[in-house]
Amino acid sequence: MQGPRASNLPIVDYCWKSIVDLWFVVGAIFTTTIIIGFTRLKMTLGQYQKQRRLVLAIVLGLVFIGLLFTKTSWENEEFAELIEAVGVGLIAIGILGRMWCTLYIGGRKSLKIVTQGPYSVSRNPLYVFSSIAAAGLGAQTESIVIAVVFMVGCAVAFHVVIFREEAFLQEEFGAAYSDYKSNTPRFFPKFSRFSDLDELTVVPKKIYSTFFDGLVFFIAMPVLEFVEYLQDTDVLPPLLMLP
C-alpha cells in the first residue's frame, strides 16, 4: 500500500507548473526591460514602430507558451463553440478595421496629422482594431477570460507606443496636434465626432501590407486547435482552467 502523498498535485504536474510560472516571471522582467530601454532612446517614428513589433512579438511568444498549459473550463460545448465563433467575428472586424485605418494613415503618419475617417473618432484606431482582433484570437481558446486578457494586454502594450508617438507628433506638428488631441480621444472611439473626406488618395502597398499582417490572426487559429488536440489527448496536460 502506498503511503500518504504530501500534495494532491502529482510531482510531475507540480514541476511543470513551476516551470510555467518561472517562464512568465522571467518573460515579464525581460519584456519590461526592453520596453523601458526603447522609451529612453530617441528614435524616429518609423524606427520606434519597428521596435514595437519586436516587443509585441516577444509578448505574443510568451503568451503562446502560457496557452500550451491553459484550457477552457466550460463544459457546455455549444457555449464554448459560440465563444470561438464570436472570436472569429472579432478577428474579421479587427482585420477590416485595420485596413480601413490604413486607407487614411498609410504612408502619411509622420508627414501630416490625419483627422478624418476612423481618425476623427480616435487618435489611435489602428491599435483599437488590433486589440479587438487580439480578443478574437484569445476567444479561439474558448475562454472569455483569455479573450479579455488578450484584449487588455494588447491595449496596455500599445499605450506604451502611443505615449512615445504622441511626444514625436507634438514636437513635429506643435499647436495643430495639440488641437487634435483636445478634440479627439486617445483610444476609445467617440463616434459622434465622425467626419470623412469626399476623396482619398490610397497607397495600395500599405493596404496589402496591413492585410497580410492581419492574416497572422487567422494563421494562429489552426495552431490553437492543434494545442487543444494535444491537451485533449493528454500530451500537454493543462495546468490552469479558465472560464
Image (spheres, grey):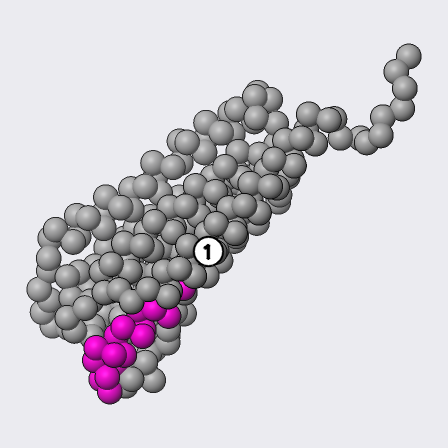
Residue at the top extreme, as displayed: 1
**Does the segment drawn in magenta span residue 68?**
no
**Which residue is rendered at x = 45% and y = 34% of the image?**
224
Relative to 135, is 240 above or below? above
Q: Main secondary structure of the magenta part?
A: helix
Relative to 69, is 166 above or below? below
Q: Quadrant of residue 162?
A: bottom left
Q: Quadrant of residue 163?
A: bottom left
Could you say where residue 15 lies in the image, as x and y percent from the top left? Answer: 67, 30
Query: In this view of the protein, which residue sits in the foreground, 183 or 117?
Result: 183
**Does the segment drawn in magenta span residue 165?**
yes
Q: Amino acid at mark 1?
A: Thr
Q: Quadrant of the N terminus?
A: top right
Query: In this view of the protein, which residue sits in the foreground, 186 or 11?
Result: 11
**Which residue is rendered at x = 41% and y = 46% of the image?**
58
Judging by the rendered image, the residue that carries numbered circle 1 is: 33
Q: Quadrant of the C terminus?
A: top right
Q: Secondary structure at mark 1?
A: helix
Read off the magenta span: 160-177
